[in-house]
Image: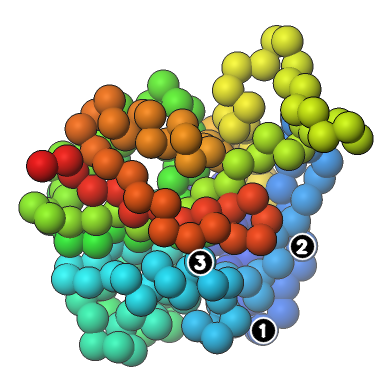
Amino acid sequence: MNSKKDPMGRAIAEYWETKRADRLRVFSPMFEEDEIPLTTLFRSYEDMPEIERKALNMAKGRILDVGAGAGCHSLVLQERGMDVTAIDISPLSVETMKEREVKKVIEQDFFTLEGQYDTILMLMNGIGIVGTLERMPEFFKQLDSILASGGQVLCDSSDISYVFETEDGIIELPDDMGYYGEHSFRMQYKDTIGEPFDWLYIDADTLKQKSGRCGYAVELVAEGEHYDYLARITKKE
């Protein structure tokens, strides 16, 4: 990724350096303008939601932290003496993680990563990097390559069908819409504007269906308070 088009990385680096940051703005054709609070990317274990804490407590063996951002999850595991590797496509985020003394950090796209891992963490809706349902087989093909025998993927996501719920409690999806969890976004921090990217919010039933077709099983481990859930994905025996 070009650091000049890396709004999240710039925001993370500036917050780490100054402990202050401007708004990290998020735009989408489907939603009103939103923003990501930078403090959530630097939070301690005690400040994480229960779903994230549960995932960290379940992590074992050689751990891969996908889309690690500022490294908050990697640092918790590292402090516990665990073997964790953090990856992110943002060069500025990677540099910040190194400054925060995350020991193993790689500027790397998940889909081209090599190696073997016992636990793959995809937190804060990290499975969203798949982008579209059409790309799910590619995701599982990559797991075939990097997930060790007996390994697990711990990921959280959200069922955002509630966005389309009427006052009567009925889900009404637009006729011209494909899967309701597929969206595109663009981020901006000050004058740094990122490229548009696809992002996937996948409901648990669809995740189970797509996983099963590719030889994987899904266990729903926990449910959050905002239509979110934590899933454990493993290879079928």
Q: Residue beneath label 1, please?
A: 19
* Residue 168 tag number: none
Please name the residue that numbered disc 2 is placed on: 23
Inspect this view and state whether residue 73 appears.
yes
Which residue is at 58% across, 23% downward? 179
Q: Residues within 10 Å of mark 1 (few under 14, many from 20)?
A: few
Image location (x, y in percent) of residue 180: 63, 27
Q: Dot 3 lies on which element?
A: helix
Find residue 70 and report its horizontal and vertical position in percent. Answer: 49, 71
Of 180 and 25, nearer the camera is 180
Q: Say whether marks 3 and 2 touch (CB < 8 Å).
A: no
As measured in the structure, the alpha-carbon distance from the residue carrying label 1 to the one carrying label 3 is: 26 Å
The image quadrant of residue 178 is: top right
Alpha carbon of mark 2 to alpha carbon of mark 1: how far? 13 Å
Q: Which of the two discs, 1 and 3, sits closer to the camera?
A: 3
Residue 81 found in image quarter: bottom left
> 208 left or right of 235?
right
- Amino acid tagged 3: Ile
**Residue located 70% across and 10% down the image:** 176
Dot 2 amino acid type? Arg
Residue under pointer 3: 51
**Is 33 situated above or below 35?**
above
Left or right of 91 in this view: 192: right
As helix, strand or loop, the secondary structure at mark 1 comes to loop
Say whether disc 3 or disc 2 marks the residue closer to the N-terminus: 2
Residue 90: in sight, yes or no? no
Q: Kindly identify the amino acid type of the residue bearing the numbered disc 1.
A: Lys
Using residue 173 as the reference point, say whether residue 206 is left or right of it.
left
